[in-house]
Image (spheres, rainbow, N blue to C red):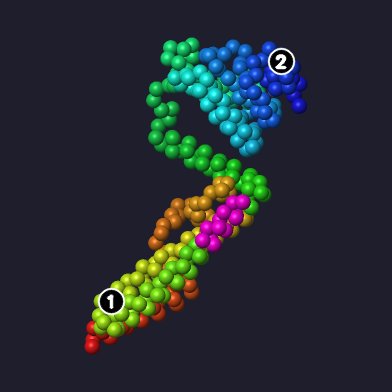
């Protein structure tokens, strides 16, 4: 624990500063007025733990701060009815951080108030440089994801498992829907001697076959994602994008690939049904 005398915010949190105007204090956060509010209602939201750098907060502290910010912003809005509100957080001397304890400023705004906040005109980097910067941050984000805890990983795996289960249920549902359709169309084609009805049945087989092959393809993609997450590869936490488990640049579309079509769950089921329909149609045409 930091000596409250050396950090003014820790002093306020510990209750040593009797002059502080405390809005409220919970188990996790403390909300109070700064020494010199910039506008009417200017409020600080800080974590109770002494952390200097924003990026050193835990995920739980981040959530608590987010909730406190929202709650306080709503109270300021309903109590003071400002025309606007700035949320300002500064980390590091270059960003004008002065007190080394993470804090968020909530600054209610009115036209012509004392506050000045000026954004520079134009972009800091040209288009190409922006794309490179984007790639650097995204790559760092992937590394970030590899530090997720065991509990989060288990939860992520169970989400993926649920999709795999749903895909295989959808696959068996498409088979059980198709069988009565085929029986009725082929049977009706024979009794009414209409080859076109038989062809309609074939079309149904094709549509259901493609659907089923696609379910299989998605199931495979998610199984691969499951394996990657289970192996601790850098997949962003809770991502459900199976493309991340494939080599870079691979796009996961909804058109089944040949191995999906050829699979034991697709070709041996839909192939004979299609051949039977074509046989019925051919026989009716040639009669
Ligand atoms: Zn502190």
Tell me the SS state at disc 1: helix
Location of residue 281 in the rendering, given as x and y in whole percent from the top left corner: 28, 81
User: Position of 233 compared to 191: left or right?
Assistant: right
Location of residue 50 in the rendering, given as x and y in whole percent from the top left corner: 69, 27
User: Quadrant of the rendered structure where residue 129 is?
Assistant: top left
User: Quadrant of the rendered structure where residue 223 is?
Assistant: bottom right
Main SS of the magenta part reads: helix
Question: How crowded is the residue under tag 1: few (<14 C-alpha within 10 Å), some, or many (20+)?
Answer: many
**Quick check: marks 1 and 2 in contact, CB under 8 Å?**
no
Question: How crowded is the residue under tag 2: few (<14 C-alpha within 10 Å), some, or many (20+)?
Answer: some
Q: In this view, does 156 lie above or below 135?
A: below
Q: Disc number at residue 197?
A: 1
Location of residue 63 in the rendering, given as x and y in whole percent from the top left corner: 60, 35
Would you say residue 283 sits in the magenta stretch?
no
User: Position of 39 compared to 274: left or right?
Assistant: right
Taking the spot 48% from the left edge, 72% from the top edge, the residue there is 265
* Residue 223 visible in the displayed image: yes
Q: Give the range drawn in magenta.
A: 155-166
Q: Could you tell me how far apart the alpha carbons at marks 1 and 2 are, in whole angstroms?
A: 86 Å
Find disc 2 in the rendering and name its residue.
17
Location of residue 18 in the rendering, given as x and y in whole percent from the top left corner: 71, 14
Foreground disc of the pair 1, 2: 1
Q: In this view, does 199 lie above or below 39?
A: below
């Amino acid at each position: 624990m930091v000596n409250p005398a050396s950090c003014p915010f820790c002093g306020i949190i510990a209750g040593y500063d009797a002059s502080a105007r405390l809005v409220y204090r919970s188990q996790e956060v403390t909300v109070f007025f700064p020494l010199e509010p910039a506008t009417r209602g200017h409020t600080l939201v800080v974590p109770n733990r002494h952390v200097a750098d924003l990026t050193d907060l835990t995920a739980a502290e981040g959530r608590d701060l987010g909730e406190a910010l929202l709650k306080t912003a709503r109270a300021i809005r309903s109590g003071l009815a400002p025309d606007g509100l700035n949320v300002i957080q500064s980390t590091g001397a270059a960003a004008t951080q002065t007190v080394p304890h993470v804090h968020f400023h909530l600054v209610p705004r009115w036209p012509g108030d004392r506050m000045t906040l000026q954004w520079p005109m134009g972009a800091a980097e040209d288009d190409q440089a922006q794309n490179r910067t984007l790639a650097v941050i995204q790559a760092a984000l992937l590394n970030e994801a590899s530090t997720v805890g065991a509990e989060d990983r288990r939860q992520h795996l169970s989400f993926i498992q649920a999709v795999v289960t749903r895909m295989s249920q959808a696959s068996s549902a498409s088979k059980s829907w198709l069988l009565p359709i085929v029986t009725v169309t082929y049977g009706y084609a024979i009794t009414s001697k209409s080859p076109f009805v038989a062809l309609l049945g074939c079309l149904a087989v094709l549509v259901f076959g493609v659907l089923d092959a696609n379910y299989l393809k998605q199931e495979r993609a998610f199984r691969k994602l499951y394996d990657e997450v289970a192996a601790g590869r850098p997949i962003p936490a809770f991502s459900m994008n199976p493309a991340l488990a494939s080599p870079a640049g691979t796009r996961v579309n909804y058109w089944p690939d040949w191995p999906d079509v050829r699979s034991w769950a697709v070709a041996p089921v839909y192939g004979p049904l299609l051949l039977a329909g074509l046989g019925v149609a051919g026989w009716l045409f040639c009669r």
